[in-house]
Amino acid sequence: MEQEKHVLVIFPHPDDEAFGVSGTISSYIKQGTPLTYACLTLGEMGRNLGKPTFATRESLPEIRRKELIKASEAMGIEDLRMMGLRDKTLEFEDDGEMKAMVRHLVDELQPSLVISFYPGFAVHPDHEATARAVVRALREIDEKDRPKFHAVAFANDTEENLGQPDVINDIRSVQNEKLAAMRAHISQTARMLEMLEEGIKVNDPEALKWVTDERFYTYDWNNDNVE
């Protein structure tokens, strides 16, 4: 992984970072790279309430806040920003305000790399709204000053449209940190963790891929079609 000046990670929900980029986050932090994680909501409308159930609709926001803090500690994150937006409503937020929120973070932190979702290939409406806000904020910056944008894409037609990932980070040395981050979000991840950890024990390739590498696309500014 290249040395970066500062990495800014922007996702809408607690656990988005754990599944897709926690190994990359831990790797940068172990390199000594300053890193900020801006989590836009608390994921308070998440479908899962634990397995067995231990949360309620009323208690889930505070549970997920604590889980986010615990996951951040597992990855080594010291600069965690909880941005206070409401889960499952980001697509209805004012586009200008969303863009301004991202631009403020970029102007403050001056990152050399931003990590978020790839617009059009992020599946969930909150993911897509976050991706669009990041693109809108970054494209206003002169190309010579614009940070790199590494984007997570996981729609079924991703490779058909975007090809193979541009960046593949080897995270084998930090797989324990990734698993710890996923375990921290236990209200949401219990069922998947059971399957994942059993698969790792028997060297199942589908399970191992979660803890061997993380894949990103560099955003194609020449084909930017975000309005």
Image: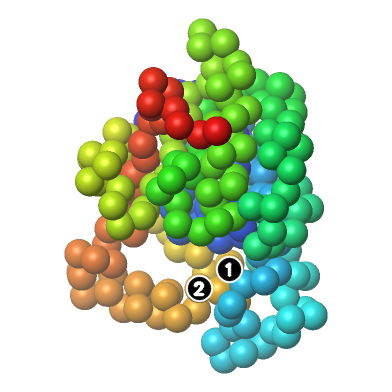
* Residue nearest the observer in this picture, 61 or 120: 120
Residue 102 in the image: state x and y as whole percent.
68, 34
Q: Residue 124 vs residue 55: left or right?
A: left
Callout 1 touching callout 2 (CB < 8 Å) = yes
Q: Which amino acid does label 1 sit on?
A: His
Q: How many marks?
A: 2
Residue placed under numbered mark 2 in the picture = 189
Query: Which residue is located at x 25 percent, y 46 percent?
Result: 159
Q: In this view, does 42 lie above or below 128?
A: below
Quadrant of the rendered image containing residue 60: bottom right
Find numbered disc 2 in the image and state the secondary structure of the residue it sits on.
helix
Residue 189 lies, in percent from the top left, at: 50, 73
Q: What residue type is labelled 2?
A: Thr
Q: Residue furthest bottom?
A: 52
For mark 2, does the 10 Å Cα neighbourhood hold few (<14), some (14 to 19), or many (20 or more) residues?
Answer: some
Please provide percent x and percent y for residue 135: 55, 31
Q: Quadrant of the N terminus?
A: top left
Q: Name the residue under label 1.
A: 185
Q: Work out how far the residue at label 1 is from the one at label 2, CA to CA, in angstroms.
A: 6 Å
Q: Residue at x 27, y 74 (%)?
A: 199
Is residue 186 visible in the rendered structure shown here? no
Q: Is residue 132 above or below residue 12?
A: above
Residue at the extreme top = 144
Q: Relative to the observer, which residue lies in front, 89 or 184?
A: 89
